[in-house]
Amino acid sequence: MAFSAPIDPQFNQELRTLLEERQEELFETFSPPESRANSQGSTENVSEDCIRHDANDDEDDSDEDEPLTEADPTELARLYSQTHPEMVHEDDHREDDDDDLDKSSVEAVFRTGCGCKHQCYTNFSVDRVWEYRLNMSEFQKDQLDVLVLAKLEQCEVQGEPIRGGKRERQFFDYVFDGHRTCEKVWRYIHNLGEKRFKNLKAHYKTHGVVPRDHGRRGKRPVNAYSFEVVQDVVKFLLRYADDNGLPMPAAPHGRDGRPPVYLPSCDTKADVYKKYVNACKVCQPAKQSVGETTFRNIWKLCVPHIQRMEPRTDVCAKCEHFRNEIQFATTEEDKLNSSIAFSGHILKAQKEREFLNSCIKRAQGEVTDITVQPPCSPCSLDLHNVHYTFDFAQSFLLPHQSRQVSPLYFLNPLRVNCFGVCNDSLQSQMNYLFDESQTIGIDNRKCHGANNVVSMLHNYFHEHGLGEKGCHCHADNCAGQNKNKTVIHYFCYRTSTGLHDEINYHFLEPGHTKCICDACFGKIRQVYRRSDVDTVSQLADIVSKSSRREQGEVLW
């Protein structure tokens, strides 16, 4: 109802005026049962109509209405609200529940009463009703709906068929804690608004105890954009990426999606949206444009491979060179030649990446059929497709604090180098740590040379090799580390002395050399940035923690 608190004197004065103006209507409502029955020529007695409620009261005869007493403030408030609509609470026009869960409000409702002759609130305590309303408020809306529908099924009393058996009237005996109550009290105890409870009864009459679904569920919204408008957004993004983006040869490791296209880091999504709106305006005729939020959602759902390049994203120098030539070409011939060269570079990088993935797949399939426990004697197992990847990581600086300490910033820290050898057949990586005192040169000089690579590769094959007869090795194109005669001579030494029957040495396209070793180094960096590290042994513990295996694989 519109009011739940005691009525003030001003309100009573206005009600007296209303009573004088509407005497006839109020006489029908407030007259005693005997006089009303005599005026209608009926002798029916009213017994428990205030307890048993009819769901179709709007269709019933007037002689079945519950008589009210003159002192009923609830009915007075209803009549007052008809002539003073500004006083009606907004909850009467929407389906929201009575969310006033304070104990004081429950006490006020108890003082006001329910308005029926049985005074239903006297059967319960304030604490019990308040606690139950709090419990009901913990339910989600759909859960409370099902609970109320199930209770309505228990309270339903089937009436006699009327009007030729076409319809049965619905009656409900509302019971709470073993006491029969009127509908108003039962609804208040279950924390339900008047409109919501009315809708629930209508839903129960039509569908029974079934969760309610929104009427528009599964239907296309009336304000949705057409397919042509969404298609225009996708076409614009694809064209913009072709003109300004930098395509990658393959998807990042671990993703089977479309290769990403990086837009310049200076172009934000808001800037791209403004260009899209301007493009829609200059079209003849002008096309409909979508809002910025919708634009971002379409971008995320339809073309997620078009991404904004981070300011420090590592890109290929050749790709950047070709992109600049295409963007700033003065003639169509220069632009065509640069596009052909760019396309050839991308295709070459894609082929190298596909060959790397095929080598890893063959290596993993071969090892699954054989139980291997390294180290093994050279050429002791009939394996010909074992795959290794090796590379250097960026140097670690010690001491390292997760919180920046000002005096340490100005000191010259100790550099610790990390070299990783990944066995793609077993999906494991061995990391070698060595500081400045263990390098070939003085003061960390010649720490990344070919001699260091050969030394650590030889130790790995001897201590952690699988005893394969043939293998494939992938490395980047760094001439000072991997692509030099020293490393190639070492592989020739292994095949000539019988340590291997065959070694295939491969290099990825420059600028597109990211491999599984870089992913493992990234995992180490994540733990390293959050930790305080003072010694090499502590750094070795950090490397072990970054591994999913029970015992991290690290040597120093």
Image (spheres, rainbow, N blue to C red):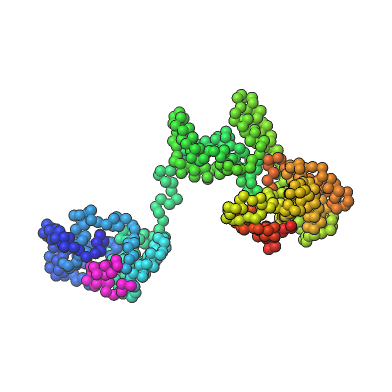
Residue 544: tell me if it is visible.
Answer: no
The N terminus lies in quadrant: bottom left
Q: Is residue 395 left or right of residue 188?
A: right
Q: Nearer the viewer, residue 449 or 139?
A: 449
Q: Nearer the viewer, residue 57 or 408?
A: 408
Q: Identify whether 198 is placed above or below 221.
A: below
Residue 29: quarter of image: bottom left
Q: Residue at x 45, y 33 (%)?
A: 287
Residue beneath the point at 83% across and 47% down: 491
Image x and y of residue 301, in percent = 53, 45
Marker count (numbered) = 0
Magenta region: 104-127
- Name the quadrant of the C terminus: bottom right
Q: Residue at x 21, y 61 (%)?
A: 77
Q: Is residue 462 left or right of residue 27?
A: right
* Quarter residue 134 falls in: bottom left
Where, by quadrant of the figure, is residue 511 drawn?
Answer: top right
Residue 89 visible in the shown view: yes
Residue in front for this viewpoint, 255 or 465:
465
The residue at 16%/65% (across/down) is: 30
